[in-house]
Amino acid sequence: MSLYAIGDLHLHYQSVLKAPGQLHDRVWKNHEEKFRKNCGKLLTEEDTLVLVGDHSWGKNLSECELDLQYICDLPGRKILTRGNHDMFWDVKKTGQLNDLYRPHLTFLQDSYETYQDYAIVGTKGFTFEGPFYLDRCGRIVDWDEKEEIHAKKLVDRELLRLRKSFELAKADGYRKYIMFLHYPPTNILEERSGFTDMAEEYGADQVIYAHSHGESRFHDSIHGVFRGRIYHLVSGDFLRWKPLKIL
Ligand SMILES: [Fe+2]
Ligand SMILES: [Fe+2]
């Protein structure tokens, strides 16, 4: 019995949209088939797979049906968190999604799930992604301050949602946590953030995130041990479509 994670599948069985790199990078070629095969080899029905957002390019639920069916057909229990491209998933209608896909998929939002004595907590998160202005040597010399102010508002909202997830688990007696985000826990300028602080406050053992795909983005945020927590990037192309074993 194991816990696995991956993100950014960007499925598009009913959509022509593609992620950057999805058109020409070899790693994306037949990625649905590569991932399905890897899951078939690694996962059993006893395992849990957390998919940390950017599941589908579909603009609404009817455009995502085949993508979600693909996820339903993977082995084991599947828990989904939201990514920035998941237009089919209105936060206020998370209950309806859960009703529709129970018992095959669990959509985690303002709630928590359990794995053994761990609580699986999470939210989409948010990071300021620029624009950053560079000098001739490629060093960051400035950034868009308006965008930064806007990002701070979104970060605050996501921190409230994350706290709710932690608090619900804590109220039910859970003291061990794995924290899942879609966005990286920090932007490229930050060493720590509200998200890393919250991971420390509640004592999350691990922080799992995605969203950074394409080789130039793989090192946008933290990898490995940072201030006592373990951070893992699990974007699909970074993992070469092999889900990462978390526990
Ligand atoms: Fe993505
Ligand atoms: Fe994303």
Image (cartoon, rainbow, N blue to C red):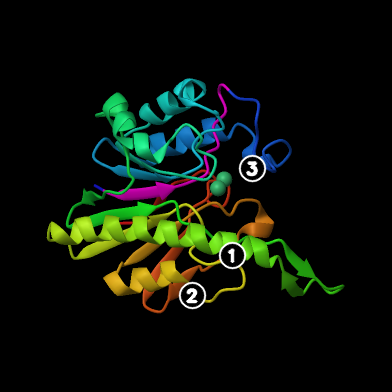
Query: Amino acid under label 1?
Result: Ile
Tell me the distance, in whole angstroms, between the alpha carbons under discs 2 and 3.
Answer: 31 Å
Disc 3 target residue: 27
Judge by depth and name the residue closer to the eye, 171 or 214. 171
- Front position in the image: 224 or 121: 121
- Is residue 199 shown left or right of residue 25? left
Q: Residues within 10 Å of mark 2 (few under 14, many from 20)?
A: some
Please, which residue is most extreme toward the bottom here? 227
* Residue type (three-letter) at the residue carrying disc 3: Val
Q: Position of residue 217 (x, y in %)?
A: 64, 58
Q: Is residue 3 magenta?
A: yes
Residue farthest along the right direction in this orientation:
136
Residue 64 place in picture, x, y as percent: 49, 25
Q: Is residue 225 magenta?
A: no
Any mark on residue 192, and which? 2
Q: Which mark is residue 187?
A: none
CA–CA distance between discs 3 and 1?
35 Å
Name the N-terminal-most of marks 3 and 1. 3
- Tag in front: 3 or 1: 1
Query: Label 1 to label 2, Cα distance in Å?
Result: 18 Å
Q: Is residue 100 above or below residue 83?
A: above
Amino acid of disc 2: Arg
**Where, by quadrant of the figure, is residue 96 drawn?**
top left
Element type at mark 1 = helix
Residue 149: which disc?
1
- Mark 1 vs 2, N-terminal side: 1
Q: Which residues are magenta?
A: 2-14
